[in-house]
Amino acid sequence: MVELLYKQLSFDIVGAAMEVYNVLGSGFLEAVYQTALEKELTLRGLLFERKVKLPVSYKGELIGEYEADLVVDGKIVVELKSVSRFNSAHEAQAIHYLTATGLQLALLINFGASSLEHRRIVKSQKQKFASIREISGQNSLEPKT
């Protein structure tokens, strides 16, 4: 049997998202859910960075940047949505974030459907990437208040 990557941490994040959904329901903008989820993660003692800037290079030259909603414990990219349903572009976005960070797991969480939706996106690590701490310029994660 294959063990899930960061199983407990993933369950903790999804559990926090479920609590947010149970309290707020659907219908708010993504920013409302992000603020509420950050509060819930903090209440649960989970470490995270918010709005993490991820550089995009083309032929060795920086041409822009992505912004990941959350990176939890330096291990999991969390991308939040408030849409009627996921589409392939959402999964592609998560894969790009994993490529940019070198992390292996992203959670897509959608608060906009009739019930909370979440997907695990796993990317195998075949080459060396910059670490999330190198990208964000931080050496440690701290709970946000």
Image (cartoon, rainbow, N blue to C red):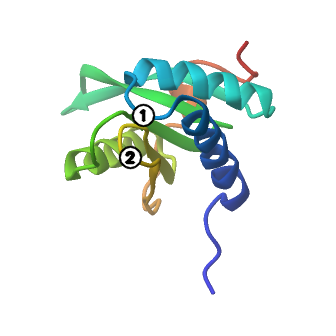
Q: Residues within 10 Å of mark 1 (few under 14, many from 20)?
A: many
Label pair 2/1, CB-CB below 8 angstroms: yes
Q: Position of residue 97 (x, y in %)?
A: 38, 39
Q: Give me the residue at 66% from left, 54% from top.
A: 11
| Residue behind mark 2 | 114
| Residue behind mark 1 | 26
Please tell me which of labels 2 and 1 falls first in the chain. 1
Q: Give me the residue at 35% from left, 33% from top.
A: 82
Quadrant the N terminus occupies:
bottom right
Q: Quadrant of residue 80?
A: top left
Quadrant the C terminus occupies:
top right
Residue found farthest to the top: 145
In the image, what residue type sits under mark 2?
Ser
Q: Position of residue 128 (x, y in %)?
A: 47, 50
Q: Nearer the viewer, residue 34 or 54?
A: 34
Q: In the rendered view, does 86 fall on the left or right side of 18?
A: left
* Local SS, label 2: loop
Q: Position of residue 14 (x, y in %)?
A: 60, 48
In the image, what residue type sits under mark 1?
Ser
Instruction: Give the CA distance from mark 2 to mark 1.
Output: 7 Å
Q: Give me the residue at 29% from left, 37% from top.
A: 83
Label of residue 17 in the image: none
Q: Nearer the viewer, residue 65 or 144?
A: 144
Q: Give me the residue at 62% from left, 24% from top.
A: 38
Q: Position of residue 136 (x, y in %)?
A: 54, 21
